[in-house]
Image (tube, rainbow, N blue to C red):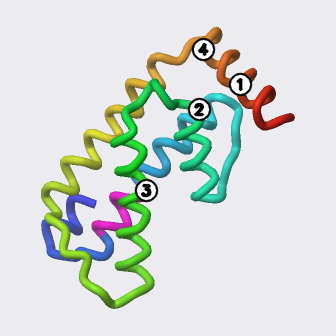
Amino acid sequence: MKVNAENGIEDWAISAAYYAKYFSVYALLSNLGVKSEIHDCTIALFAYLFRGSVSPGLVEGLRRSKRHRIETQYYTGEVGLDLGEMSVETNRFVLEMEKVLDGLNTRRIAELREKLKRDIGS
């Protein structure tokens, strides 16, 4: 992401920023034993499971990154992002996911799995 941003390759920088965020959430869910490969489902599940544990702005940042990636990858419109700011935000997001992951213990993982079973089903 950083190399693309530094070289003005906006579409790839935006795409890399989104995937850095997405895969950090994917890794978090994997640690719970959850495999979700549909991006919208992964994001929704993350928002649902970690409501109250992460800020709503973090979830919205992930959704916004996904929209930006779609805009630049599939359409010709300029997104007009500050690539430096995007890089900083992405780094913050990934670090926050690392903190959440570090905060998981067997009890918390069991709670989150139970929440899934109770509210979504097995």
How far apart marks 3 and 4 lie (CA) works out to 25 Å
The residue lying at 29 percent from left, 49 percent from top is 90
Horizontal side of residue 110 vs 22, given as left or right: right
Query: Of marks 4 and 2, which one's residue comes earlier in the chain?
Result: 2
Point out the tag, 3 or 4, that comes first from the N-terminus. 3
Q: Are marks 1 and 2 in contact (CB under 8 Å)?
A: yes
Residue 55 or residue 14, whichever sits in front:
55
Q: CA distance from mark 1 to mark 4?
A: 11 Å
The residue where tag 2 is placed is: 49
Query: Which numbered mark, 3 or 4, is in the foreground of this view?
Result: 3
Q: Amino acid at mark 2?
A: Leu
> What residue sits right under mark 3 in the picture?
63
Q: Position of residue 56 (x, y in %)?
A: 39, 39
Q: Quadrant of the N terminus?
A: bottom left
Residue extending farthest right: 122
Write the start and end of the magenta stretch as one range: 13-18
Give the mark, 1 or 4, whose residue is nearer the N terminus: 4
State the separation of the CA atoms marked 4 and 2.
Answer: 11 Å
Q: Earlier in the sequence, mark 1 or mark 3?
A: 3
The kind of secondary structure element at disc 4 is helix
Return the mark for residue 115: 1
Q: Secondary structure at mark 3?
A: helix
Please tell me which of labels 2 and 3 falls first in the chain.
2
Q: Report which residue position mark 4 lands on.
A: 108
